[in-house]
Amino acid sequence: MTDYFALLEQPRSPWLDPEQLKQAFHAKTLREHPDAQPGSDGNDEAFAQLNDAYQILREPKRRLHHLLTLAGASPAGETATIPHEIEELFPAVAELTKQASVVVQKRASASTSLTRSLLQPELWRTRDAIAQKLLRLETLHAAAEDELRSLGDSSQDNRAALQQLYVRFSYLTRWMTELQEKQFDLTA
């Protein structure tokens, strides 16, 4: 397995400064880009690997997965449980997702302008509910990033904490993406 931290000359750490990571990526891509060496065939595979490294290291969930895998640990280890605040959100997110799907379906089957007009208040309420839930999820995501920042290095003693954070990021990113898609469906 390729060590993406080493590839982008970054410390093996749960937290990476986004701006420094971006600068390191741009510097490496300028040197490694297939078009950078005139007269050479270029190495598209190495360049693609740099892109993969950047995509993985810039997202906390994927970075933690990679870090834990490099350390020989399961990202969602035996000690990782679903955090209470995440567990409490599950039914609300599921219900909101279902509600949004129903509204989208109703809108798709509305055949007259009157029917579509009558559906608008329900559509607005659902969009507002999604916006509020997304705000809550984004707040939890930011708190998880703050916790990640405070962890420091990825030594053995914080492996369980990294696994817990991985679980939190897994749920939060999945739900945020799901609700953003529903929000888009409701505005389209």
Image (cartoon, rainbow, N blue to C red):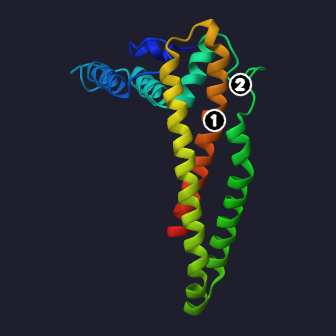
Confirm whether residue 188 shows in the render: no
Q: Which residue reaches farthest left?
A: 38
Numbered-mark total: 2
Give the amino acid type for the residue marked by disc 2 in the picture.
Ala
Q: Secondary structure at mark 2?
A: loop
Point 63% across, 8% down: residue: 157
Tag 1 or tag 2, which sits nearer the N-term? 2
In which image quadrant can residue 66 be found? Answer: top right
Quarter of the image that includes the N terminus: top right
Point 39% across, 17% down: residue: 8
Q: Within 10 angstroms of label 2, few (less than 14), some, or many (20 or more) residues? A: some
- Relative placement, left or right, of 100 versus 43 is right
Point 58% across, 74% down: residue: 123
Q: Are marks 2 and 1 in contact (CB under 8 Å)?
A: yes
* 120 is higher (above) or lower (below) than 139: below
Give the amino acid type for the residue marked by disc 1 in the picture.
Ser
In which image quadrant can residue 42 be found? Answer: top left
Given residues 124 and 111, the one toward you in this image is 124
In which image quadrant can residue 67 be found? Answer: top right
Residue 61 appears at what percent x and percent y? 57, 30
Q: CA distance from mark 2 to mark 1?
A: 10 Å
For residue 113, which numbered disc appears in the image?
none
For residue 76, which numbered disc appears in the image?
2
Given residues 135 and 119, the one toward you in this image is 135
Q: Secondary structure at mark 1?
A: helix
Residue 187 appears at what percent x and percent y? 50, 68
Confirm whether residue 109 shows in the render: yes
Circle 1 sits on which residue? Answer: 170
Q: Within 10 angstroms of label 1, few (less than 14), some, or many (20 or more) residues? A: some
